[in-house]
Image (cartoon, rainbow, N blue to C red):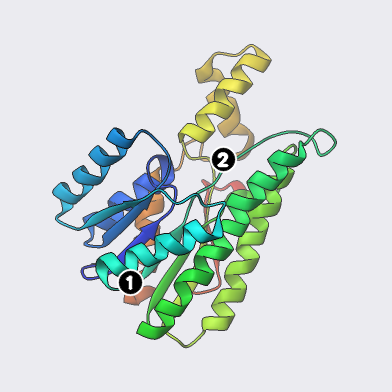
């Protein structure tokens, strides 16, 4: 389905990003993967995706809080494969605290990666997409890009900003063969969410299983986690001709969270 297309997926050494990368590779896209981790583990992941799906995969260690690193990552995709056709801005971090107690350095870190990193990724990739007359930008937002929760001011601000930026880029690229959309997942069982579950369990004296159920039931009516693979399949669909007129949208995949 995506044969001949070349994709960048940020934050793809684990969690949602890894799930998206695996789905895109399974459908034929060459990949630039990106993220932090042990060198040996990342190389094993890179080689495994390449071998399993018969595509080319390279790794970028770009720090998504640094615009120069992001530009170099885009250049790596172009020099390795000839173009950048798909950009999935997925990398993100989280910190929870009330507004009064939110540390300045944590605010700046969340905004730098979750919001500014998305901007600089799009800025670097768009000239290449315009030159080719084709591009698919898929920003991974959150249900928190559409609604809010207490103690997540930086994350909610960043994800709302991502939804807004996606609309701007969609308008600026309308009719060019480029689309820009934001996928807004609810709770996905990733290492990031697991940390929140474990913190809740410790703070409130629950088992990890009870905390997981409590987290889901509070927000997600389906009572089930969204999977990285489901997000990957939605991202892949947005890259197809069938989705050529879907642009500037925020697409919830949240088990009914934002229907309430």
Numbered badge on residue 202 = none
Can residue 251 be seen here? The reply is: yes
Q: Residue at x 52, y 82 (%)?
A: 173
**CB under 8 Å between discs 1 and 2:** no
| Residue 196 percent across, percent down from the top left | 58, 28
Q: Residue at x 32, y 36 (%)?
A: 39
Q: Position of residue 93 (x, y in %)?
A: 57, 42
* Residue 74 pos. (x, y %): 41, 65
Q: Is residue 126 above or below residue 43?
A: below
Determine the secondary structure under disc 2: loop
Q: Residues within 10 Å of mark 2 (few under 14, many from 20)?
A: some
Q: Residue furthest right?
A: 100
Q: Which residue is mark 1?
A: 240
Q: 210 or 28: which is nearer to us?
A: 28
Q: Write down the residue under mark 2.
A: 221
Position of 224 with respect to 155 (left or right) is left
Q: Position of residue 34 (x, y in %)?
A: 39, 49
Whether residue 50 sits left or right of residue 123 in the image: it is left
Foreground label between 1 and 2:
1
Q: Would you say residue 245 is visible in this rendering?
A: no
Tell me: 36 left or right of 110. left
* Nearest to N terminus: mark 1 or mark 2: 2
Image point 48% across, 40% down: which residue?
188
Q: Quadrant of the N terminus?
A: bottom left
Please report the residue visible at 55 percent of the width from the left and 19 percent of the height from the top: 210
- Most extreme residue toward the bottom is 175
Q: Is residue 65 above or below residue 99?
A: below
Q: How far apart are the alpha carbons under marks 1 and 2?
A: 30 Å
């Amino acid at each position: 389905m995506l044969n001949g297309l070349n994709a960048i997926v940020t934050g793809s050494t684990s969690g949602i990003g890894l799930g998206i990368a695996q789905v895109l590779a399974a459908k034929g896209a060459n990949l630039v993967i990106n993220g932090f981790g042990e060198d040996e583990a990342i190389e094993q992941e890179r080689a495994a995706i390449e071998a399993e799906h018969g595509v080319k995969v390279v790794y970028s260690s770009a720090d998504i809080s640094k615009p120069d690193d992001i530009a170099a990552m885009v250049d790596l995709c172009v020099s390795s494969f000839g173009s950048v056709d798909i950009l999935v801005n997925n990398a993100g971090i989280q910190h929870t605290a009330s507004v009064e107690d939110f540390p300045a350095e944590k605010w700046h870190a969340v905004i730098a990666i979750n919001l500014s990193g998305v901007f600089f990724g799009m800025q670097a990739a768009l000239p290449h997409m315009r030159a080719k007359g084709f591009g698919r930008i898929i920003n991974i937002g959150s249900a928190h890009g559409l609604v809010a929760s207490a103690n997540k001011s930086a994350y909610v601000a960043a994800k709302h900003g991502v939804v807004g930026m996606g609309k701007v880029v969609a308008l600026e690229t309308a009719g060019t063969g480029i689309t820009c959309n934001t996928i807004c997942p609810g709770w996905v069982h990733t290492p990031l969410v697991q940390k929140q579950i474990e913190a809740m369990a410790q703070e409130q004296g629950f088992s990890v299983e009870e905390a997981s159920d409590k987290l889901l039931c509070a927000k997600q009516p389906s009572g089930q986690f969204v999977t990285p693979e489901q997000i990957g399949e939605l991202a892949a669909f947005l890259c197809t001709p069938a989705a050529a007129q879907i642009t500037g949208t925020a697409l919830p995949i949240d088990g009914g969270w934002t229907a309430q």
